[in-house]
Image (cartoon, grey):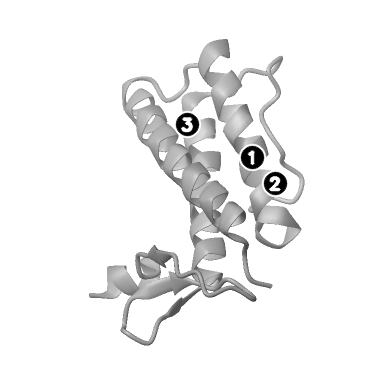
Amino acid sequence: MALTPQQIEKLEKISGQMVGLHKEIATLVKKSPNDGLNEFKLKFVNAILGEANDILGSTHKPLADFDQFDADDVPTTSDVALILGQYIEELERKRADNIKRGTNGVWIYRIEGSDVMIRTAPPKKIQEKK
């Protein structure tokens, strides 16, 4: 089933936030992989994970029994980086499953019952093979 323009906007926003968080956490991992993530950062990580779970649904959710980190059981920076990496992959898979090459050769989202064309980048798997 194709995405709505609102779902596309949410997917794009969450994907960008997730990549940004992953970069920040990866920096912390290089310094101290076994340090716990502080409560302030964990709150933002969990909020974005919750939004990602909503847009991914059960079909694309990377880990069936994981929704977010337990604030009482502080995860390490390396644990957070691992999970964020899994979510980034599934967000991209959801995006790739919902795009197509348009008649003019550009990649666009599939939007059922609409003439709206929202351009996007080619699927990452295609870009990596070049």
Task: Determine whether, in the image, residue 18 is placed left or right of residue 83.
Answer: left
Q: Residue shown at 48%/50% (left/top)? A: 12
Under circle 2, the secondary element is helix
Which part of the image, by quadrant, shows the N terminus? bottom right
Amino acid type for the residue under numbered disc 1: Glu
Residue occupied by mark 3: 78
Q: Secondary structure at mark 3?
A: helix
Q: Earlier in the sequence, mark 2 or mark 3?
A: 2
Q: Which residue is mark 1?
A: 51
Distance CA(mark 2)–CA(mark 3): 24 Å
Measured Cα–Cα span from mark 1 to mark 2: 5 Å
Q: Position of residue 116 (x, y in %)?
A: 50, 69
Q: Quadrant of residue 70?
A: top right
Of callouts 1 and 3, which one flags the residue occurring earlier in the amino acid sequence?
Answer: 1
Percent position (x, y) of residue 77?
A: 48, 26
Q: Position of residue 102 (x, y in %)?
A: 40, 82
- Residue at the spot x=51%, y=63% of the render? 95
View extreme (bottom): residue = 103
Query: Residue 54 bears which disc, if any?
Result: 2
Label 1, label 3: how far apart the Cα atoms are: 21 Å
Amino acid carrying mark 2 in the image: Asp
Label 1, residues with CA under 10 Å away: few <14, some 14-19, many ≥20: some
Residue type, numbered disc 3: Ser
**Which label lies toward us, 1 or 3?**
1
